């Protein structure tokens, strides 16, 4: 199967055969992409040449054409291309030599900066004239230009002539090839065989997906020279630098314990663990679709955000927080560009958990007629399109406290795999939350009556239950740094004024809305009791001997 880069190279070869005179290739990976461009040019029966302002014209092996001594200047280079299209060979000094019937593809590395502003207007006009003439030049002297640049900002004057191509990052197959090359570079056969065993290879590839080819090769090399084997964890840390560099997403380190750090929400946790298996090589071979994610709706402080953090730990992938409000800008068009950039980074990272926290606030203007110039509406459109059409392996977790602020089109099937309702914890869950909070605060007291504390915390949110543990610790510390007791926890709980007292009406409205529209994240007390009830035993009539 062809890699994504090979598919793009084949597309470029077709464009060259179709006499597209100017291609604008967007990439930061000059060396890797040039190899594919050479192949594309040769496949289209062109001789590839490179140009940059440091060495001038060179062939695909890097040999500089010393006869074209003035070609370091881009305007002279464009004149040479024009002369070649006319069948004339320029010696670099403005003199025409013998006719040259070769077809060339000119890969220009440094052209983009020369086309900007007033200073570049002459070069831009020269390139524009050249793009118009090259398309109709004789077939046997056909010339075309590929501008290689990290920027996708094509000058308006060239927009009608340039075909823009965004070069993809290496996919799994290409990363696998980079990994094989790194392992083969080890001289000692025994070390080479142990460097990346079969059970590590898939994880090592997953860890590097989202990095450029050079970044992946460097990470593999660093791992090999450091510990003489490929460590997926070490390779995966490089992704944090990628996210920090783009400045459109927040990287969160995984929380210890994963889903075990969450008290209760058993239905939700069971569902999440079932979806984890969809990322295995067996699931990929079976053709199982990649999970899209879930929407968590419910009472504030009941574990929605904590779940998003815990999922990343359980899945062993990075956690990226997308704050759509922070991406908004006062400049026209920049907000939409930031959102699209964030989605590109997510797709590049590969396997990850994307956390959209309190999404109803970020998209509120799309449904309430906000006077923001349509930015919220455009953001909603971008989110909906991406969630429906995305091809990556990102698992999206959206959290919302106020369902009435969400646009209906966001909730329809296809955007998410499931919508869960997260309610106030049941008594069983309050016990589980209390135990998790004690573990998180490194308390090992065993004399706690969990049931009594759970009763005292009736109608508390999970965050409120967790908050009574440090408050009880302050109380016990002030009393001679003794261990905390059940009484400490009960007294602290009695002093707390829970959310249900201040927002009871709104919580009831949310519960009413959730009926028949969402799936419960928690098991009811009746379900828990039924699971704990022992199975009936058959009573046999056996006479005593």
Image: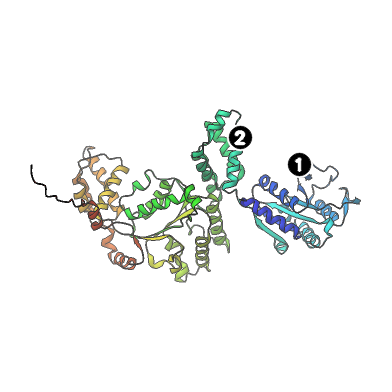
Query: What residue is at 21 percent from the left and 43 percent from the top?
Result: 448
Query: What residue is at 55 percent from the left and 48 percent from the top?
Result: 210
- Quadrant that contains the C terminus: top left
Rate crowding at label 2 as few (under 14), some (14 to 19) or many (20 or more) other CA atoms within 10 Å: some
- The residue that disc 1 covers is 62
x, y percentage for residue 303? 34, 54
Displayed quadrant of residue 140 = bottom right
x, y percentage for residue 103? 81, 53
Left or right: residue 123 versus residue 468 is right
Helix, strand or loop at mark 2: helix
Displayed quadrant of residue 153 = bottom right
Of circles 1 and 2, which is in front?
2
In the foreground, 129 or 276? 276
For the residues labelled 1 and 2, say whether their Cβ atoms are less than 8 Å apart.
Answer: no
Query: What residue is at 73 percent from the left and 56 percent from the top?
Result: 115
Helix, strand or loop at mark 1: loop
**Residue 74 visible to the viewer:** yes
Residues at marks 1 and 2, CA–CA distance in whole angstroms: 26 Å
Left or right: residue 167 versus residue 207 is right
- Specify which label sits upstream in the sequence, 1 or 2: 1
x, y percentage for residue 498? 26, 57
- The residue that disc 2 covers is 184
Position above or below: 422 against 350:
below
Rate crowding at label 1 as few (under 14), some (14 to 19) or many (20 or more) other CA atoms within 10 Å: few
Left or right: residue 222 versus residue 401 is right
């Amino acid at each position: 199967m062809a890699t994504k880069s090979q598919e793009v190279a084949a597309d470029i070869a077709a464009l060259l055969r179709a006499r597209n005179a100017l291609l604008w290739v967007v990439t930061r990976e000059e060396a890797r992409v040039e190899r594919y461009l050479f192949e594309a040019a040769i496949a289209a029966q062109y001789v590839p040449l490179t140009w940059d302002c440091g060495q001038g014209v060179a062939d695909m092996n890097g040999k500089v054409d010393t006869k074209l001594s003035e070609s370091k200047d881009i305007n002279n280079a464009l004149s040479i291309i024009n002369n070649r299209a006319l069948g004339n060979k320029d010696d670099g000094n403005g003199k025409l030599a013998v006719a040259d019937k070769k077809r060339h593809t000119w890969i220009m590395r440094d052209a983009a900066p020369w086309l900007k502003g007033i200073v570049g207007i002459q070069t831009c006009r020269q390139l524009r004239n050249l793009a118009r003439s090259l398309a109709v030049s004789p077939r046997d002297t056909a010339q075309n230009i590929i501008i290689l640049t990290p920027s996708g900002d094509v000058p308006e004057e060239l927009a009608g002539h340039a075909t823009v191509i965004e070069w993809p990052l290496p996919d799994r197959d290409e990363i696998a090839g980079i990994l094989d090359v790194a392992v083969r570079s080890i001289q000692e056969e025994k070390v080479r065989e142990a460097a990346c065993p079969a059970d590590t290879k898939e994880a090592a590839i997953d860890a590097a997906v989202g990095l450029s080819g050079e970044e992946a090769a460097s990470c593999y090399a660093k791992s090999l020279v450091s510990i003489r084997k490929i460590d997926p964890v070490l390779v995966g840390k490089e992704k944090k630098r990628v996210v920090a560099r783009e400045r459109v997403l927040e990287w969160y380190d995984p929380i210890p314990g994963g889903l075990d750090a969450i008290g209760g929400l058993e239905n939700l946790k069971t569902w999440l663990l079932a979806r984890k298996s969809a990322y295995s090589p067996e699931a990929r071979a079976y053709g199982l679709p990649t999970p899209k994610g879930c929407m968590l709706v419910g009472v504030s402080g009941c574990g929605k955000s904590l779940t998003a953090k815990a999922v990343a730990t359980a899945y062993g992938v990075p956690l990226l927080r997308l704050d759509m409000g922070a991406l908004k800008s006062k400049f026209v068009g920049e907000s939409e560009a930031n959102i699209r950039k964030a989605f590109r980074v997510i797709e590049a990272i590969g396997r990850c958990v994307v956390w959209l926290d309190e999404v109803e606030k970020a998209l509120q203007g799309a449904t309430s007629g906000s006077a923001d110039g349509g930015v919220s509406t455009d953001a909603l459109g971008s989110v909906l399109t991406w969630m429906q059409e995305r091809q990556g392996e990102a698992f999206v977790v959206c959290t919302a406290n106020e369902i009435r602020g969400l646009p209906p089109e966001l909730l329809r099937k296809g955007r998410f795999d499931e919508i869960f309702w997260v309610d106030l914890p049941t008594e069983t869950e309050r016990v589980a939350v209390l135990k998790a909070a004690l573990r998180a605060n490194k308390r090992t007291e065993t004399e706690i009556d969990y049931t009594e504390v759970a009763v005292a915390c009736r109608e508390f949110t999970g965050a409120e239950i967790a908050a009574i543990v440090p408050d009880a610790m302050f109380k016990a510390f002030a009393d001679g740094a003794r261990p905390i007791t059940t009484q400490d926890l009960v007294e602290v709980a009695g002093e707390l004024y829970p959310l249900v007292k201040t927002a009871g009406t709104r919580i009831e409205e949310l519960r009413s809305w959730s009926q028949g529209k969402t799936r419960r994240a928690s098991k009811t007390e009746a379900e828990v009791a039924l699971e704990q009830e022992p199975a009936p035993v058959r009573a046999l009539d056996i006479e005593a001997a």
